[in-house]
Amino acid sequence: MTLPSIMVFLPFLFLGLSFLSLLLLLTRKRKGKTAAPKLPPGPAKLPIIGNLHQLGKHTHHSLWQLSQQHGPLMYLKLGRIPTLVVSSPSMAREILKTHDHECCSRPPLVPTTKLSYGCLDVAFAPYGDRWRELRKVCIIELFSKKKVLSFRPIREEEIERTMKMISSCSNNLTPIDLSKLLFSLSGSIVCRTAFGRCYRGGEGSQFHKILKEAQAMLGGFFVANYLPIFGWVDKLTGMQTRLEKIFLELDDFYQQLIDEHIDPSRLQYDQDEDTIDALLRIQKDANYITQEHIKGVLMNIFIAGTDTSSSTVDWAMAELMRHPRVMKKAQDEVRGIVGRKGRVEESDLHQLHYIKSVVKEVMRLHPAAPLLVPRETMRHFMINGYDIPPQTTVIINAWAIGRHTNTWHMPHEFYPERFMDSSVEQLEGHGFELIPFGEGRRICPAKHLALLLVELVLANLLYCFDWELPGGMRTEEIDMDEATGITVHRKSSLCLVAKRYNEMDC
């Protein structure tokens, strides 16, 4: 939309804001004698929009900067939404452990509600009996150790295929768009595991296009989330149209997959049970699970599962290229332990302590979801003498917690050794210093699968190849800027030259 066309609506928006400001002032005067709750500290708020104007391009950065002034427990008003921002491990523990049950629901946001079929999923559904039942089914049938192990051949095949692609480029030292390759690898593993099929070539390009648009919508700014009375602005900006369009495309995509799986002719083939098969089987016995529930769960797997793992490995390789000492130490470890086997296997990972530390350090500095998934309080409770009202959105700034100066020595430095023999309990469900997957009742149910995939892909990249920057590029020229979105990627693709290690048959 052009600037002149937007200007036409500004007078109406101004009149609306003025009218609402007057109503707000009158309401406050009527309630003047009522004792106000003692809320956590926070910056001054403007009428109607509250603190929305203080959120910059990267929300996790803006919230971290505000927390430096107002503390690790900070109260904001984002339009009409009361918001609690948590920025330290101790306050995260209060929310995610001590008061987990009081604030384990989800706020009803426009894009998440639409793309999850009215929150009939696991990630965005409000807390309740149906959510508990669906989550239990997903953990047992989709993410149990037995189920994860059953998909091991798929992970091995797709990783081997990717290593061979890199190896073919290494023959003539052709630069590789590693970011694109990692995204494709992650997508192939997720699709084969969940859908029983893979998307390559032109079909793969369309698949990636749909995925990126869905992620853009989930991370997009919708006025209706914060100021429902001005929801019509989303129509003017085109956001509502884009959301409806991608919903229809995704719905058609899911429906085709479901139809393929219930096609009687498919049953004559001997195929391993994928995620859709499992959900359809469960649906026969659990009448509360509809096709919309199945589509909602597929949305969680498709959008979250594809992107987060590839983004983490991409950040890891960028950091390792910037820190050759760490790169060599990680390569020496994996090559010393794996030897001449030709491939890192899942059974090797428990011995790769330094590579595990590298992954933790990457997740500390670059959590894929820096603000996790917002929570919502279900009832009033107190923290540090402050009132936390019901229906308050709770944002856990995992990015800020990973840089907390009282917890981490040299918090902005990439230093994996901090996790070797560390007293800090990370990623094991005991500490709150490192929480890229969340904690408590709403912890990511696929946490262990995601960690396994990140460690396995990274270990194979370091085992099979030595890596160089193309065209005389220097390490300080690697772009570490973040792109905007629900998952934080690097803004620029990481292009590297791979050289086979000692002619390893990768």
Image: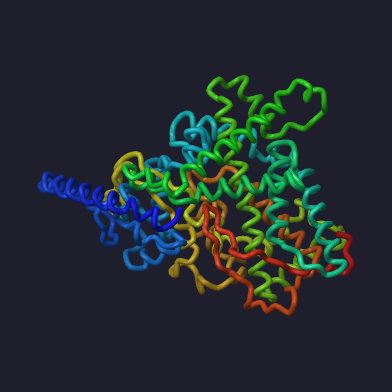
Q: Position of residue 42 (x, y in %)?
A: 29, 60
Q: Position of residue 131 (x, y in %)?
A: 49, 33
Colouring method of the image: rainbow
Q: Is residue 110 above or below residue 317?
A: above
Specify whether 54 is left or right of 208.
left
Q: Position of residue 311 (x, y in %)?
A: 62, 57
Nearest to the observer: residue 506 or residue 62: 62
Specify whether 92 is left or right of 249.
left
Nearest to the observer: residue 373 or residue 12: 12
Nearest to the observer: residue 482 or residue 129: 482
Specify whether 377 is left or right of 410.
left
Note whether residue 98 is visible: no
Q: Quadrant of the C terminus?
A: bottom right
> Residue 6's quadrant in the figure?
bottom left
Note whether residue 108 is visible: yes
Q: Position of residue 264 (x, y in %)?
A: 75, 20
Question: Which residue: 62% across, 70% down?
Answer: 417
Give the number of callouts. 0
Q: Is residue 454 above or below residue 234?
A: below
Nearest to the observer: residue 317 or residue 144: 317
Question: Which residue: 68% across, 51% down?
Answer: 452
> Residue 380's quadrant in the figure?
top left
Question: Which residue: 13% across, 45% down?
Answer: 31
